Image (cartoon, rainbow, N blue to C red):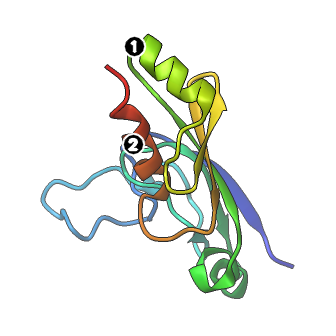
Amino acid sequence: MSQLLLFNKPYQVLSQFTDRDRIDTPRATLANFLDAPGYKVAGRLDYDSEGLLLLTDNGRLQQKIANPAGKHWKTYWVQVEGIATRELCEALASGVSLKGCQPGGSGFAQRVGKPGGSAAAGGAYRALQSCVS
């Protein structure tokens, strides 16, 4: 039977167990938090984001979840930081077009859709952040 691990990945942690790109000055990885030999990450979060990460010991399940060809829809929530100006509040109240993103309320934007490349949620965050002064 497949085993699943749910991990709340902290900010500035790689969504992998090793950092091959920076051998001299390695960044924090999942290995700093988890002792999970045989587990693979199903999906990913950017280094500069935080949130729920799913890991499994079943390679076929990992591929089914993580591979964009699997056409699994996901929901991303991104927090907007900054000062909420009147213009931003009006834009959020009337709806903001962010290439598939919808405002989710309470300073968050929601993106529902198939993953289409790295940093899908980050793109929504940056688009909304540009409206914040």
Q: Is residue 87 among the parts visible in the rendering?
A: yes
Q: Position of residue 126 (x, y in %)?
A: 37, 42
* Residue 68 percent across, percent down from the top left: 58, 79
Q: Which circle's residue, 1 or 2, is located before the other in the chain?
A: 1
- Residue at (43% x, 36% y) in the render: 128
Hey, which residue is sitting farthest right in the picture?
1
Element carrying mark 1: loop
Local crowd size for mark 1, using a 10 Å CA cut-off: few (<14), some (14–19), many (≥20): few
Q: Which residue is drawn at 37% across and 51% down?
A: 47
Q: Nearer the viewer, residue 58 or 86?
A: 86
Give coordinates of residue 92: x percent, y percent: 56, 28
Residue under label 2, please give it. 127
Q: Is residue 101 left or right of residue 6?
A: left
Residue plotted at (49% across, 49% down): 98
Three-letter code, disc 1: Ile
The disc label shown at residue 83, or none: 1
Q: Residues within 10 Å of mark 2 (few under 14, many from 20)?
A: some
Q: In this view, does 86 lie above or below 51?
A: above
